[in-house]
Image (spheres, rainbow, N blue to C red):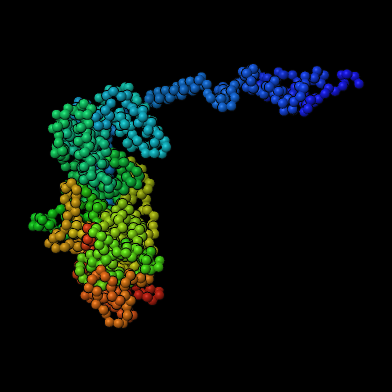
Amino acid sequence: MSEHRRKLPQPEGGGRASARRAAQPRPGRGAAGRDVPTASHSGPYAPQPAQGSRSEVRRASQRGTGRGRGAGPAARGTGRPDKRLINYPRSDRDGWKRFVPSWKFVAGTALGFFAVITAGAGIGIAMVSTPDPNKAAQAQNNVFYWADGTQMVATGGSMNRQIVPISSIPRSMRDAVIAAENESFETDKGVDPMGVARAVYNMATGGSTQGGSTITQQYVKNTYLDSDQTLKRKATELFIAIRLGVSEEKDTVLAGYLNTAYYGRDAYGIQAAARAYFGKDSQDLNPSECAFLAAVLKGPNLYNPDGGIGAAATPALNEKRARERWSWVLDREVEVGRMDKAARAKFTDADFPPRVESEQARGMTGQIGYLVDTAKAYVMKTKNITPEQMALGGYRITTTFQKPKVDALSKAVEDTRNGFIDEKGRPETDTFVQFGAASVDVKTGALVALYGGPGWDHKYFSNNANTSGVPVGSTWKPYVLAAAMEYGTQNSKGKGISADSKYMANDLTVINNREGRPLRDASGAPFKQKNESPTAFGYVTLNEAMEKSINVPFAQLVFDVGHDKVRAVAKSTGILEESINPNTDASFALGTSTPSAIRMADSYATFAASGTHREPFSVTRVEKDGEKLSGFEAAAKDQRAMDSAVADNITKVLENVVENGTGKKVKKLGRPAAGKTGTTDENKSAWFVGYTPELSTSVVLFRTDPNSADKKLISMKGVGDIPSLHGGDIPAEIWTEYMGEALKGQPVKQFPEAEDIGVTADSAGAPSPTPSAVVPPSPSPSTLPPSSPPPSPSPSKGGRPTCPPWKLYCDPDTTRGTGNGGTDSGNTAGTTSGTSTGVIGGSTGSPSPSQSGRPGRPGGITGGVNNSTPE
């Protein structure tokens, strides 16, 4: 065999195939992979290593041939260049370095972005126009209509809105505003970049809208009060502010702002504000008055001492805020060098500037101011409208208020006031007595009437119909009983209980907690609940306890049911959570919560509507500049608050309060009605809340000095020459007179018949009725009762006014309870648990027998005649 055909010795793991593979390049996109020639069979064999594995050969081959793009120093930057417009990710780098931009790329991007922003800003600034202060100050009337479509009142649009030059704005006003709102106003360029960025971010992410923080930006914002709070509008404001900052004199901008800003009292502009608050022209304002107006600019709804809209905007709170802000503005002027200390020292707290009577108030006579205030608040809440936007006007608002009913309620209050109250003859007791009332349509939840006070024209701006902070007393007890009927007690094994269930009612009875252990008072001794009367009632049914408004049974029942269950029931009927007492003491059951008269009337309407709650509303239609706004077409959807049988049984119990309890004074109404009275500790408030099948109405009486700083409640003992005033007195008189007039001519309607519900679940220690002789009660009310029923001054009645034959301890005497009845008085711990009496007008009708043949539920007559006329 010839030499050239003789095979060479093969290294381990080598061979011709291995050599061929080593000679061939790996595929790739770099230049190195294209320029290396492929091995040929006719060419010489590559030198072979003496020894080595197949993997070593491969690695050696790879080092020699390269691996494509970026394979080695010799390969980088060679071959076909990258033709992309932007070389990113970078083709001349490996791994993570491909994503590190070059300085050219960064510089070019920044330059391009700046160019786009600059061009956009230039176009935006060129396209916008400067504000017109005359146009911005042109507020329109808001027109309010009665429920029947006739006009109630037109408000706004009547103030002096003259635009004044900077020369008519005193230096002290300019100094006060600049010191309080924009210290750098005279040197800045009209915008606050950080403030703008913050506002844009908040709106872009769905957060709260914010205006610009500089005076220039606020001036621009004032021209867009009736526009949507959008990112587009904010951009427009920004462009205008930038334009003004570079093109207008500072005095022009400042005058524009002060001529367009809203100061409250329907006043837009400094001249209108000077006339509205002080009855003078703007040029005549003194430094104290200027500081006041600068303070009001912080937010008129919260800083106008007249009061504003919302629970936090009462006249008292606004007055306090306004005084603090006024003092701060003066101090701030000294701090930034716009007032010297000697001038500041001239203004003490006693120099807080007095205001003239509001022009707005002069046009709001009688109840009109309170009606308008209520309707405005409803519109603003429904459509998320600010007070400033509302003050610009242009709204046509149709309310639910019925003029005949409003007039009837006002007349009932004034007639009763004139008959009971004698401020000149009894100044020690009859001064500062305040009245509030509200009436709600049971079927819809519409507010048809309210009484808020003497009137804005009498300088009384608080709306007593919507005032929280007045405890409701025993009008709270129906919620405790409803919760027991709905959820049961610890003694009913999870089943709802009947009003026939018996509870100890003796005065100063020890109350046990849910664990069965006595509550403790402040001294650590067992807590004993007090009734108004020391009468030894013994064990009574809950129906009788409600009839006589005895405290002890309900103080114990709330622990047997659970405070959270009672809160749930109250909230389901429309009581606002913030007005419910958060404590878990015995007094909670006796009315230490503070809902408004509007909420109490609406809540009791839930019982009248067999457990269906309808949220109260006061507006049915709103138009803005001729266009109808949505959201007012119909009332809120009905909500099931409780089982209808529970609500109807509460109605029966409250009917019995009228028929046989402390509410007999109201029976002259002459139609079916149900309700409850409440009087708080020391007679500081007195309530009557009641309803017929058509209307639910609440009346509250309380005593407080409207000019006092703390507005504390004062005892009403002796008011109207009544030693101890209860809800069954003056409030019941007002309620009866109003309801009689409001329902005049309407057919008499009956409440739904209440079916038997629940189980009889007596409290711990209650005796079971037996034929044995009655044992006298224990002399100590805090000890356990005897095994047989203790006697009362008169035998305890059962859950029904009539006596079934199987009832061994029942008194058919229907004349009992003609006195004022029991009241809830304060406990030894000093909590407010007040006095309360049950009362309602009219007598019950004659319900037809239920399908089961059983008599009606507690309260009301189980058979008999139709007593639809006055007794």
Residue 34 point in image, percent of width and height: 70, 20
Residue 667 visible in this rendered orientation of the protein: no
Q: Nearer the viewer, residue 69 or 262?
A: 69
Image quadrant in which you'd find residue 31:
top right
Residue 842, quarter of picture: bottom left
Image coordinates for residue 782, horizontal then vertical, percent: 25, 68
Residue placed furthest toward the right: 1
Q: Quarter holding the C terminus?
A: bottom left
Quadrant where the N terminus sits is top right
Residue plotted at (76% across, 22% down)? 49
What residue sits 90% from the left and 19% below the top?
2
Name the one closer to the observer, 654 or 555.
Answer: 555
Q: Is residue 242 above or below residue 681?
A: above
| 562 lies left or right of 171 | right
Q: Quadrant of residue 81?
A: top right
- Residue positioned 29% across, 39% down in the render: 388
Question: Which residue is located at x 25 percent, y 50 percent?
Answer: 371
Q: Against 228, is 316 above or below?
A: below
Q: Given the current orientation, which residue lies at the most extreme front position?
A: 51
Q: x, y (%) of residue 547?
A: 26, 68
In this rendering, is residue 621 above or below 245? Answer: below
Q: Is residue 488 left or right of residue 719?
A: right
Q: Judge whether residue 1 can be spotted in this image.
A: yes
Name the spot of residue 136 as percent of width and height, x first: 29, 33
Task: Report the number of discs.
Answer: 0
